[in-house]
Image: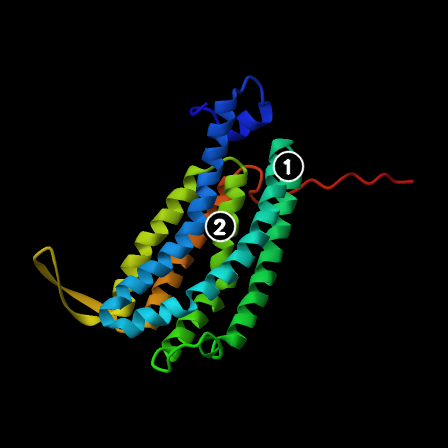
Amino acid sequence: IMAKDITSIIRDNTGLSFWSKAGIAVRMSLPAMLAQLTTIAMEYIDAAMVGSLGANASASIGLVSSSLWLVEGVIFAMIYGFSVQISHSVGANDEEHSQRIFRCGLLFSLVFNAVIALLAFLISSHLPFWLGGDPAIVKDASTYFLVMTVVLPITRIGFYCASCIQATGNMKTPAILEASMCILDIIFNCFMIFPSGTKTFLGISFYLPGAGLGVAGAAWGTAIAEFIVTGIMFYIAVRRTRYIRFKKIARPAQHQS
């Protein structure tokens, strides 16, 4: 089973034992779980890396984390609504229908995410006060929440593409890219959070240029990492993935009376 394509196994559905089906379910569910964990892990990475700037910097990220998780949850619910339909079409071997669903979902995601981002923008300056934040951290908390949400129309397209790629049976590629996003987050955070200066790592001193943006730098470092992975994920979805890649869909012939 491990050597066969998951899509072919599900479509054939012949000669599968209980444990084989359980194994397929695990292989298909783990990447979806990884996608959820990735967003949470990146916020923990941000909080940990700004921790060296002081307790207030970490607290400002922690204050709005639950609100960001709520926003992410709403967006992921929408994403899975389309990816489930694509998986049904893939199981029925209906390539044209899955392409139409993917394109419709892509357009809807852009509009839906833009609306969510706009609402988040409108409440970003008030949210830390609503959550009872200390006056010393509300400015950084508001900035972090604002940056993380205004980029949603672009960055969450990457998660949409990842979910749709998984629906076609390709579990490995999205998982690798989402894990790589955490590594990119750490790299870009180093440049965005801290000011330029000489750093020491494992006894080796080196000069590291930096923007010195603090908490805002953590948000921008995360956003840049997501932009890069989103671009790669989008290319793989629309050019390299059967069932959802962009290609001309044949129109039904019209009969003349």
Q: Residue furthest bottom?
A: 135
- Cα distance, mark 1 to mark 2? 20 Å
Q: Residue furthest front?
A: 132
Q: What's the residue type where badge 2 is placed?
A: Phe
The residue labelled by disc 1 is 89
Nearest to the observer: residue 17 or residue 93: 17
The residue labelled by disc 2 is 234
- In percent of width and height, residue 30 lies at 44, 40
> Up-down: is 100 above or below 118?
above
How many numbered badges does the structure rendering display? 2
What is the secondary structure assignment of the residue under circle 1? helix
- In percent of width and height, residue 160 lies at 52, 51
Whether residue 232 appears in this view of the structure is no
First in sequence: mark 1 vs mark 2: 1
Q: Residue furthest top?
A: 15
Which residue is located at x 34 percent, y 64 percent? 221
Residue 68 left/right relative to 225:
right
Residue 72 left/right relative to 38:
right
Which residue is located at x 42 percent, y 58 percent? 227
Q: What's the residue type where badge 1 is placed?
A: Ser
Residue 196 left/right relative to 81:
left
